[in-house]
Structures are given as C-alpha cells and as structure tokens.
Image (tube, rainbow, N blue to C red):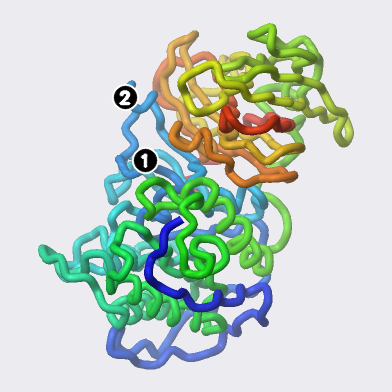
C-alpha cells in the first residue's frame, strides 16, 4: 500500500439508486462544441436484452481485449486472434451477467491498427483529444463510434492527458478545466446522437510522486465527473476509487498490476461486478445474449456439453475421483492433490468439482491445474467463414484462493495449432494472485472466432486453473461446456 497524496472525495451514487434520467432536455450552446440545438431521442428504458454496449477510451478500456500490441497471429503469441481479458472490467461484468452485447473480434481492416473491431474501442496510450487531431484521440474517434448507433457507450479517458498533456510534441500535463471541457464535449456529442453514456471516473495511479500536482487534477476532474450523475443522457457513473482502488486516499496495490496504473484481474473484477453491473442491470432487461443450455446446437455434442459420463482421463496419480467423459485433468505444477467428483445439477446437467490442494514442488510461484477437452472433430460441422464461440460456467465453491480460470480455445489441423482465442485470459504474472472470488459463479466465454481459410479438422479447449502455491486449498466446479456457431457479428 502506498500513499498517493490525495484525499479522494466520497464516491458517487450509481444509477440504480437514483431515478433514471429523463430524455427530453435540450442541449444548449457551449464554448467547446458550439450550438447543438437538436438531438435524437434517447432509447426508452429499460433497454432490451442483447443491447450493444460499446466502450471508448484508453488502455483501461482496451485491456479487455488486448495487452497493448496489435493482434497478429504468429508463433510468438501462440497464433492468438482474440482475447477476452480478465484485466477488463467490462469482461467481468458480462461474465457475471451476459444480458448485454460487448463482442469484439479479430479484424485486419480495423482502422486503429489494433486488428480488433467491435464494441471495445480502447487504445493503449490514447489521450482525450490531441492538439493536432491525431486519430488516436478519444474524442476524435467518438463520432465514428456514435455513427454506428449503439444504445449505450462507456466513456473513459483523461489519465494520459493529465500525465503528459494533449499538446502534440510537448510534455505539458492537462489541467482539470481542460479535462472537464473535453469530457463535457464527449457527453454533448453523445446526447446529440441519442446515445446513453456511462461515464468513468479517472483511476488513482501510483507512478507519480506522492505530492505531484497531477493527483489534484485527477481529484478535481473526478469531482466534476461524479456531479454528472442524473444529467440528461448519463445512465450512471462508474466510480470505485474511494471504496475499492484507494480507500482513505491510499492506493490498494492488490487491485493493480505492477505498473500501479492498470487494473489487475482482482481490481477489474470488483469494478465490473460492484460498479458497472448495477447500472446495466437497472437499465437493460434481464436475460442473456446466448442460450445457457449445453444441449442446444452445441458443436461439442449434448453429452460432452452436459459433462456426462465418468470415463475422463487423469494425468497424474495425485488426481483422484471421477472426470466427465471427453475431458482430462492434469497438474502443471505445485498441486499436491486434485480430488474430483461429479455433481448432479438441474435437469440432466452435471458439474465436475476440482478440490485443489496447493504445494511447493516447483520454482514457479503458482499452482497450475489443467482441465482439457478432448479434440472435437469439425469436418462436416464447420467451414472457412463460419463464426463460433466457446463458453463454460465456473464456480468457486470453497476457499478464496483461485487466481485464474481461463479458457484457451484452439483451432487445429490434427495436432498442429493454427489459431487460438482466450476467454478471461490472464498472464502468468497474475497466476499466483487471488482474484477475490468467494462462493460465486460466472461465465468464461470467448469473443467471436472466425474460421480462417485454412485446412482444419478439430477444435480443442483447455481450461487453466491457478492459485498461489502457498495458499490454502480451494474447490471449483465446472459445468455447461458450449461451442456454438453464430451469425457473422460484423453484420449486426
């Protein structure tokens, strides 16, 4: 824990605790955007299930789908063509409640250079609005996003502008007045287009000296941001600074990556679950963007989807009990035992419990258990140009030590890896850090995955489970294994 030299103001109330804003106010003239005397009506609330929630900002948004480098399928990144990342707070929100659409996908036509298109429009290093109108500016890109007519956008930005300023070629940190004017411009542009906005406060960061004046700029900007609660067109404010990220003005480093700027999976999970989720639940009707029944249109088959049978493989004598047929459990490192059992869930659906006891028999800091699906034949089922996703439901039933539960979904020709996508992907640097889950469940689901114009004949899905090797035993349960074809998301 370190002090960051700022006493942050009390947190704002989220939209769920206030009457929803009206949609009949008129936007008047201001010095930033000029006169806006007409605007589209806002979509009526509650919004329907499956509503597209887009997001625009810097790396705090982008970290939901990539780690800063453009996606390029090559051996150096294990042929990855898409991630849903556990550092993304929006990814955690829909893992807990997939009532809204936030899909993104690999696309070499992406004009931002990330090779990613779809709902996530976050770019690492993005400033609010460059003086030379560089294309990476958040407000510079905002009109193009609004033109796609999303019902809701999440608007985030300001930390890079405060860090070094928006004057091209100069290091001149922006003042609060500039941050406020530019965020206000963004809100007015969105309101003119009839798009609801969820506005983010600026996260505390620990890479500046304790008494650096930029901390005060963050605090003053956040005071204005939180005051926009209830403004026409503002659906809610996501603010976890005072009770999650920096209680009593002291940054909680367990919520951050080592850079003290970006959220670790633990911090992203709490912001998504505790701050964004209530806003979306209060404004989007209950339901799901996909069918939870693993027997429906499942390329893995009904039996495998329901985790039927008990003839699965065990790769170590330290693994005991029963494994569902079509799956295999293994120990990567630092697990003394994995006790497996099969639970009867609702209807004919089953779940497999994995009770993990960590140990220290390897130099790595983490325990790693693998739960892998046998390869699933694609011949006659999939062809180049088809789109699919994979999903699985995970619950932590006992203990609080789970660090990672992630899917690695692979397209293969025999045993040759061609491309892969990750669901709630984490890097090995986070494997030993508990994500903060207790007794709860969530979906691990990949983003849409395009079948390439390559010869392929099978799909393989691996689940990685990690914890601190010095931690206490914990138990998770897996169920509802789904691989399903979907419509081309580019046409939605």
Checking the image for residue 169, the label placed there is none
Q: Quadrant of residue 167?
A: bottom left
Residue farthest to the left, as pictured: 169
Asked if residue 37 is positioned above or below residue 130 in the image, the reply reads below
Which of 346 and 297 lies nearest the eye of the viewer?
346
The spot of residue 341 in percent (x, y) is: 81, 21
**Residue topped by disc 1:** 107
Q: Quadrant of residue 42?
A: bottom right
Kindly report the distance in space between the C-alpha atoms of the residues bearing marks 1 and 2.
19 Å
**274 lies left or right of 123:** right
The spot of residue 415 in percent (x, y) is: 48, 9
**Residue topped by disc 2:** 76
Residue at 52% across, 46% down: 265
Taking the image as drawn, is residue 91 in sight? yes
Between discs 1 and 2, the one toward the N terminus: 2
Mark 1 residue crowding within 10 angstroms, few (<14) / some (14–19) / many (20+) = some
Mark 2 residue crowding within 10 angstroms, few (<14) / some (14–19) / many (20+) = few
Which of 413 and 307 lies nearest the eye of the viewer?
307
Nearer the observer: mark 1 or 2; the answer is: 2
Taking the image as drawn, is residue 492 in sight? no
Residue at 68% across, 76% down: 17
Residue at 64% across, 79% down: 20
**50 lies left or right of 250:** right
Asked which secondary structure carries label 1, the reply is loop
Which of 31 and 372 lies nearest the eye of the viewer?
372
């Amino acid at each position: 824990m370190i002090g960051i030299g700022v006493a942050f103001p009390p947190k704002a109330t989220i939209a769920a605790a206030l009457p929803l804003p009206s949609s009949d106010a008129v936007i008047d003239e201001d010095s930033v955007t000029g006169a806006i005397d007409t605007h589209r009506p806002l979509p009526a609330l509650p919004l329907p299930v499956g509503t597209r929630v887009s997001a625009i900002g810097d790396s705090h948004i982008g970290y939901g789908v990539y780690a800063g480098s453009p996606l390029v399928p090559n051996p150096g990144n294990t042929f990855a063509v898409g991630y849903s990342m556990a550092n993304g707070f929006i990814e955690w929100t829909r893992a807990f409640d997939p009532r809204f659409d936030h899909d993104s996908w690999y696309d070499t036509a992406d004009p931002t250079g990330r090779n990613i298109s779809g709902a996530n429009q976050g770019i690492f290093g993005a400033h609010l609005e460059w003086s030379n109108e560089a294309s990476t500016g958040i407000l510079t890109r905002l009109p193009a996003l609004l033109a796609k007519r999303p019902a809701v956008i999440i608007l985030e930005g300001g930390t890079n502008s405060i860090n070094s300023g928006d004057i091209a070629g100069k290091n001149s940190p922006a003042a609060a007045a500039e941050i406020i004017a530019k965020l206000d411009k963004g809100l007015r542009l969105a309101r003119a287009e009839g798009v609801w906005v969820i506005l983010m406060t600026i996260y505390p960061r620990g890479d500046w000296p304790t008494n650096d004046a930029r901390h005060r700029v963050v605090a003053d900007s956040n005071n204005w941001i939180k005051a926009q609660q209830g403004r026409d067109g503002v659906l809610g404010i996501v603010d976890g600074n005072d009770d999650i990220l920096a209680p009593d003005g002291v940054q909680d480093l367990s919520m951050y990556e080592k850079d003290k700027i970006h959220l670790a999976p633990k911090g992203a999970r709490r912001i998504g679950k505790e701050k964004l989720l209530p806003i979306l639940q209060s404004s989007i009707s209950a339901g799901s963007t996909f069918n939870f029944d693993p027997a429906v249109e499942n390329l893995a088959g009904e039996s495998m989807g329901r985790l039927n049978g008990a003839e699965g493989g065990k790769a170590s004598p330290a693994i005991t009990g029963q494994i569902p047929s079509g799956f295999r459990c293994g120990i990567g490192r630092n697990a003394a035992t994995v006790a497996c059992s099969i639970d009867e869930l609702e209807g004919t659906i089953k779940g497999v419990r994995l009770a993990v006891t960590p140990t220290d028999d390897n130099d790595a800091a983490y325990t790693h258990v693998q739960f892998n699906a046998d390869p699933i034949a694609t011949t006659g089922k999939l062809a180049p140009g088809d789109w699919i996703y994979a999903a699985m439901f995970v619950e932590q039933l006992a203990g609080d030590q789970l660090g990672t539960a992630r899917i690695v979904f692979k397209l293969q020709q025999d045993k040759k890896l061609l491309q892969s996508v990750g669901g709630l992907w984490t890097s090995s640097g986070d494997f030993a850090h508990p994500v903060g889950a207790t007794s709860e469940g969530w979906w691990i689901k990949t983003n849409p995955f395009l079948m390439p114009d390559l010869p392929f004949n099978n799909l393989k899905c691996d689940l990685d489970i990690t914890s601190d090797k010095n931690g206490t035993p914990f138990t998770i349960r897996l169920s509802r294994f789904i691989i399903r074809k979907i419509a081309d998301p580019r046409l939605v």
